[in-house]
Image (tube, grey):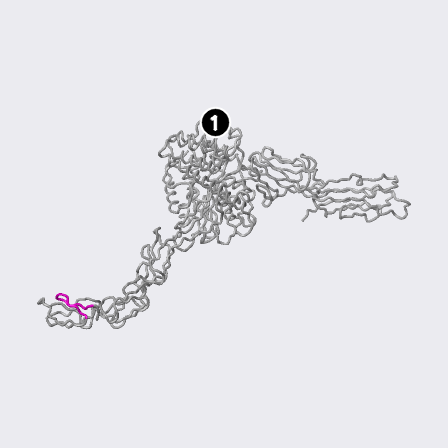
């Protein structure tokens, strides 16, 4: 009994040590951005790279998260390009495929250099949904024919399989082509989205998809919903449901320069929604972030 | 209910002499022609899929005028209406079924005597394995669905009936580029079926009779998903209450003026309770100027009476505070004889700040009996600068403070102790991570990494009702929690807060932040957390008609299931690199 007790104490000690060590690691990673103000970006990138293969998934995830954050604060193009390259080349190999894809979609066309585009071209030989969307962000025009091969007649597909087209690779390919400026696909994406009668699907899924396109026609489409007074369904009797306009604003805030509210939170107050409506009404042309 | 199968039993005594009668016995059914030598066919639907029925032919006799039996007959069993996915197969090793005996020939022995054949109504059901790693859905679809992670395996069962035909059952995936299945051939029942995710997509897996390309029996649909990974932080949030009780409840401001000596300057009142007698009864304020010299600047009063004291050109009241001396006509009598200096405080309220003493004589009651000094600060905002307390009685608000009101007595208890929320998770929230990964979101091939953040005390109860206002998404009080307690380095953050205005949890569609509320009647906070993440991460709606579903509206049941469409909704939140 005594031996058992001592063993347990030792084990607890190990766990505590392990957690505090992890916390310190994460803290160090999170502090890198603060240190970056004073230090050479090359040194910061080196520090990040040392932790990209850390045995702990959380450390790796935090490292790449901070790398993305760091890149977004930098003006030198090579830093964004380097981070994009690492997200494409390293993150998928260390269990961060999905996270990396999400982050990559927040970058712009100029952030993908030849190294990054070559990785995407290689991946397009056996494309997944993420690859296709990133291809659209990187605007690799020579992949348009390959993307076209992935297209299906969405309505026919849904009729035949009973499955919604919005989950399928073909839809992602059409979105990518639309982002790359193919008018036919821009129009088709908007047409299909406009046919969706389920307001929840429209709001939670298709707004995001159409926002991804980053073309004036897509902004025009989303703009119509910013003036909507509809709300999503109630989750509790006292909750009127979040305004559909709030979701659109969240998307548009990530698409347009000088948008009056920030993206990434929603919970917009009525006065903020009104502000965005007014701002949208006053714009003569869209300054789209690509 | 077992499936009933139709079947036709035909007994045909094919004798030209029409002399005999047989029973065709198939399991519980004994089929016999009503007359000797008559062939009859009948349909029976008592047979059940997945069962094996013994078949016997029983010779029931020969007509009396025949010298001996010739034992010819025709016995046939046919399936006329089998349910989908059921195959009838007959084992007749001794050949007792079919046509026996030729017309106009005599069989001297009954070859089928004591021999049996079997009718097998073969059926395969794919069933959930309770120890599976990923998901199973046979609730929302007629064909069961299984989820599996790409580059991993999972299993289910194939329930094969009858068991004797297990090794006649084969399994085949029609999309081996997405999912493979093993074994190819069953060996027993229930047969463990292993499914391996190859690439993201869907595959139809069939059980078939006799070979991998044989007759279709039942279908299993398999969805292979890349694993999604998310980070989640949980944080216990307490309501910060740090008001300061400046005056105890029921008290007033201590030692404030309660009674003065009135116009005669003599205290006529004895202090009661904890009131403090500053000037004894029958006395006045000591050493007050009672007489001064007149215009000639010479003190003419020569007789100083009592304990009065002559000081230079003045006479003071002395220690008893009462003027005992009569001034000369040339002097000025400031305090009348036998009086003291008027309106001097002779009693204060003492430590409790409440006046317990009623004034006597001409003494003046400054603070009414049983009251304190009005409008004194009894509760002040603490270090956070925000008043957390609600005024009681006649107490009044004065800026960030609460005062004693007109009665001078503090009726307000300062809210000075944080309202602690109950932590439903273990020290590292590993219990939550295990629950999310092994019980709930594994069904949709989603992996969570959960981090426990340090508890925080936040001043969110701005309407001071003791509750977090959760009436809609989001209230000002919820915004305070979100803005002050967020962790920007996580995909999702769940705040644990007791005492909501309503509900056991709240997270709107597609949100990063969610709230769960222990002590609200839902005993399983792990389940509540998973449910709210379903709203926030997967934008999943409630499932009022699916009580076993994680997203069922009400807590209390073992609602843990995610269905096939929900797998997709959750998966659609994120896309993957190759």
Q: Is residue B315 magenta?
A: yes
| Residue B96: % across, % down | 80, 41
Q: Is residue A117 left or right of residue B42?
A: left
Q: Secondary structure at mark 1?
A: helix
Give the side of residue B204 with respect to residue A269, left or right. Answer: right
Q: Foreground residue, B324 or A50? A: B324
Up the image or down, B392 lies above or below B194; here it is below
Residue A279 horizontal/vertical position (percent): 37, 41
Q: Chain of mark 1?
A: A
Residue B564: quadrant of the picture:
top right
Is B168 in front, or is B318? B318
* Residue B528 belongs to magenta span: no
Please give the residue where the numbered disc 1 appears in the rendered image: A118
Front residue of this view, candidates B83 and A266: A266
- Toward the front, the furthest residue is A2
| Residue A172 in view | no
Task: Count the labels in the image.
Answer: 1
Residue A99 in percent (x, y) is at 48, 36
Q: Which residues are magenta?
A: B307-318
What percent of the width, then of the height, locates residue B535? 49, 45
Horizontal side of residue A89 vs B378, given as left or right: right
Residue lying at the far left of the rendered structure: B296
- Tell me if mark 1 has few (under 14), some (14-19) or many (20+) residues whose alpha carbon lies within 10 angstroms of its own: few
* Residue B302 visible to an observer of this rendering: yes
């Amino acid at each position: 009994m005594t031996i058992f007790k001592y063993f347990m104490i030792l084990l607890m000690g190990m766990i505590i040590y392990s957690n505090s060590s992890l916390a310190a690691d994460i803290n160090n990673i999170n502090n890198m951005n603060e240190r970056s103000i004073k230090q050479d970006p090359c040194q910061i990138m080196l520090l990040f790279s040392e932790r990209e293969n850390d045995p702990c998934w959380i450390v790796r995830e935090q490292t790449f998260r901070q790398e993305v954050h760091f890149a977004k604060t930098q003006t030198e193009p090579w830093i964004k390009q380097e981070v994009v390259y690492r997200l494409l080349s390293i993150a998928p190999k260390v269990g961060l495929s999905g996270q990396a894809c999400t982050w990559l979609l927040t970058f712009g066309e100029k952030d993908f250099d030849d190294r990054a585009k070559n990785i995407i071209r290689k991946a397009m030989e056996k494309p997944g949904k993420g690859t296709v969307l990133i291809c659209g962000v990187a605007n690799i025009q020579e992949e348009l024919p390959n993307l076209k091969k992935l297209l299906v007649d969405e309505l026919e597909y849904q009729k035949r399989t009973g499955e919604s087209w919005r989950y399928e690779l073909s839809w992602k390919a059409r979105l990518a082509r639309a982002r790359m400026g193919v008018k036919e696909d821009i129009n088709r994406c908007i047409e299909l989205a406009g046919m969706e009668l389920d307001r929840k699907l429209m709001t939670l899924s298709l707004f995001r998809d159409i926002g991804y396109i980053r073309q004036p026609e897509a902004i025009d489409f989303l703009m119509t919903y910013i003036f909507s007074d509809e709300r999503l369904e109630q989750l509790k009797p006292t909750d009127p449901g979040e305004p559909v306009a709030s979701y659109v604003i969240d998307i548009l805030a990530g698409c347009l320069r000088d948008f009056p509210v920030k993206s990434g939170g929603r919970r917009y107050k009525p006065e903020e929604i009104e502000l965005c409506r007014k701002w949208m009404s006053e714009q003569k042309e869209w300054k789209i972030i690509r | 209910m077992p499936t009933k199968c139709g079947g036709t039993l035909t007994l045909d005594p094919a004798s030209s002499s029409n002399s005999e009668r047989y029973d065709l016995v198939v399991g519980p059914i004994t089929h016999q022609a009503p007359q000797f030598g008559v062939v009859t066919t009948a349909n029976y639907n008592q047979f059940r899929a997945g069962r094996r029925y013994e078949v016997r032919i029983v010779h029931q006799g020969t007509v009396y005028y025949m010298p001996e039996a010739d034992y010819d007959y025709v016995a046939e069993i046919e399936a006329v209406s089998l349910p989908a996915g059921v195959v009838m197969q007959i084992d007749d090793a001794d050949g007792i079924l079919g046509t026996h005996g030729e017309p106009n020939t005599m069989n001297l022995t009954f070859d089928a005597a004591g021999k049996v054949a079997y009718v097998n109504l073969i059926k395969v059901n794919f069933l959930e394995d309770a120890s599976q790693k990923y998901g199973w859905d046979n609730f929302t679809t007629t064909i069961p669905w299984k989820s599996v992670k790409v580059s991993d395996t999972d299993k289910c069962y194939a329930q094969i009936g009858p068991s004797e035909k297990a090794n006649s059952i084969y399994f085949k995936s029609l999309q081996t580029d997405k999912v493979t299945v093993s074994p190819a051939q069953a060996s027993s029942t229930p047969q463990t079926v292993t499914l391996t995710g190859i690439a993201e997509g869907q595959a139809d897996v069939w059980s078939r009779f006799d070979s991998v390309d044989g007759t279709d029996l039942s279908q299993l649909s398999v969805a292979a998903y890349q694993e999604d990974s998310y980070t989640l932080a949980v944080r216990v949030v307490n309501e910060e209450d740090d008001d300061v009780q400046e005056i105890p409840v029921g008290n007033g401001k201590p030692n404030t003026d309660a009674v003065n000596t009135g116009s005669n300057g003599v205290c006529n009142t004895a202090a009661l309770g904890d009131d403090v007698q500053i000037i004894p009864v029958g006395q006045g304020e000591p050493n007050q100027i009672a007489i001064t010299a007149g215009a000639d600047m010479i003190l003419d009063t020569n007789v100083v009476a009592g304990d009065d004291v002559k000081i230079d050109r003045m006479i003071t009241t002395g220690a008893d505070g009462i003027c005992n001396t009569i001034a000369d006509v040339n002097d000025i009598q400031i305090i009348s004889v036998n009086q003291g200096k008027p309106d001097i405080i002779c009693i204060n309220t003492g430590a409790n700040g409440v006046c317990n003493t009623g004034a006597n004589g001409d003494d003046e009651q400054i603070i009414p009996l049983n009251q304190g000094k009005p409008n004194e600060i009894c509760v002040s905002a603490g270090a956070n600068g925000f008043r957390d307390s609600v005024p009681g009685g006649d107490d009044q608000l004065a800026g960030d403070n609460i005062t004693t009101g007109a009665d001078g007595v503090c009726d307000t208890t300062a809210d000075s102790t944080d309202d602690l929320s109950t932590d439903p998770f273990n020290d590292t929230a590993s219990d939550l991570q295990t629950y999310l990964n092994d019980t709930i979101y594994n069904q949709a091939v989603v992996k969570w990494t959960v981090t426990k953040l340090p508890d925080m005390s936040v001043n969110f109860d701005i309407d001071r009702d003791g509750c977090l206002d959760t009436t809609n998404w989001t209230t000002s009080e919820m915004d305070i929690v979100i803005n002050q307690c967020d962790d920007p380095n996580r995909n999702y953050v769940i705040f644990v807060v007791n005492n909501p205005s309503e509900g056991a949890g709240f997270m709107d569609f597609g949100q990063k932040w969610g709230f769960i509320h222990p002590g609200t009647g839902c005993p399983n906070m792990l389940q509540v957390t998973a449910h709210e993440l379903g709203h926030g991460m997967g934008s999943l709606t409630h499932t009022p008609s699916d009580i076993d579903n994680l997203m069922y509206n009400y807590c209390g049941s073992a609602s843990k299931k995610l269905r096939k469409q929900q797998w997709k909704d959750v998966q659609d939140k994120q896309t993957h690199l190759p």
